[in-house]
Amino acid sequence: MSRDITEERIGKLARDHGFELCRITKPAIEPRYLECYETWLAAGMQGEMGYMAESTRVERRRRPSTMLDGVRSVICVAMRYSPPPYTLDNANARRRNGVIAAYAHGHDYHDVMKKRLKALARDLDALLGAHDQRVYVDTAPVLEHALAESSGLGWQGKHSLTIHRDFGSWFLLGELFTTADLAADAPASQHCGSCTACLDLCPTRAIVAPYLVDARLCISYLTIEYRGHIPHRLRPMFGNRVYGCDDCQLVCPWNGKAKAPDDDILSPRGENILPDLASLLQLDDTAFRKRFSKSPVKRTGRVAFVRNVCIAAGNSGYADLIPVLESLSDDESPLVRAHAFWALARLAGDDADMRMHLTAIRAGERDHEAREDMSITMEQTRINHE
Ligand code: SF4
Ligand code: SF4
């Protein structure tokens, strides 16, 4: 296969389908990525994402050649999305509003990318002739950032995401595994240098070492994937982030230079940019599904999402959110009740009547875990106020 076909025709087809970046590599993971992955797993940094430690999936990540019989090449593609239309300081200052990660301001990228990758695969069938292929977006056991760096698409930053010189890290990755023997591109070189901005700024210190993000501390994982009670000590660090976290990207100097794409395929919606916390707290299940229709936020579900919004409300400092939080005290979800309680305790301050009211709520709580959560809240706020 000549490089003309691999670089130009495949690249052009990828661009036609909305993938501005496209590079080719071989189905193998460089030892240094594997070492990092092993360290991450051994330390249990995958948190409750049990599937990450499941042996078959671990083996697939280690050896991408097991993803498809006879696979000989991996086409790595990236779909760009608009950076957030605010700075980190602006977002932090808008405490009455929640921050949703930029990639989730519009349509669900899983749906959009999968559809486009499949369309690209159909065109590749015509171009490459007899070959077998499979497409992957995010959820498959693929070390996508390692493959992206090997393909030259970009380098893996110390925050673990892939960075491109011109586009920063505001893009999503997809892979197309094929049995066609394509010419590989040269790997990317590292350009983080001595910078440690993302490690220094991360609100929860989740980037425990370069390239090593402890999911158990990462706001992105905790607000999107994790369905349980958020550890009390981390809640104040969440600030007003209600779905994901872009902080390590916003502080990255390579993103300071990145331009927004001319055409954002994910179509960001204005209503998802710094939405009002009070209105989010009032979403019941039907309203939540409607509000986040076709959005990746919908996949997290109303309960975990409102849990996150309660934390943001508790961190807001706005006591006028108390009535709407009180209305969640008898929410059908114990998780929501416990986090609304935490927010109320934060906003109540030294108000003696409010503290008595909270004591009564806790006494009446019927769910064991929620009650435990409330007890910790009472204990911690009591300590804070003494
Ligand atoms: S997403 Fe947020 S919490 Fe996670 S590593 Fe980046 S800055 Fe830290
Ligand atoms: S902030 Fe600095 S260290 Fe972190 S990914 Fe960007 S360039 Fe690399």
Image (cartoon, rainbow, N blue to C red):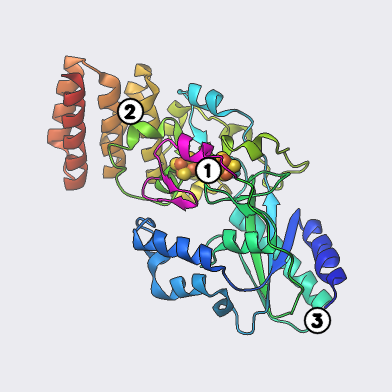
Gap between marks 3 and 2 measured at Cα = 60 Å
**Please, what is the three-letter code of the amino acid marked with disc 2?**
Leu
**Span of residues in magenta:** 193-217
Q: Does the residue labelled 3 lie within 8 Å of ligand 2?
A: no
The nearer-to-camera label among 1 and 2 is: 2
Q: Residues within 10 Å of mark 2 (few under 14, many from 20)?
A: many
- Location of residue 63 in the rendering, given as x and y in whole percent from the top left corner: 53, 75
- Which residue occupies the foreground of this view, 131 or 198? 198
Q: Where is residue 292 in the image (x, y as percent from the top left)?
A: 53, 43
Tags 1 and 2 in contact by the CB under 8 Å rule? no
Residue 108 inside the magenta-drawn segment: no
**Cα–Cα gap, marks 1 and 3:** 43 Å
Decide if residue 134 is on the left or right side of residue 307.
right
Dot 1 falls on a residue whose secondary structure is helix
Residue at horizontal 21 percent and vertical 26 percent from the top:
381
Residue drawn where x is 37% and y is 20% of the image: 317
Q: Name the residue under label 2.
A: 325
Q: Which residue position holds label 3?
A: 129
Do the numbered discs 1 and 3 sit on residues whose CB atoms are within 8 Å?
A: no
Residue 253, by quadrant, is top right
Left/right of residue 187 with respect to residue 146 in the rendered view: right
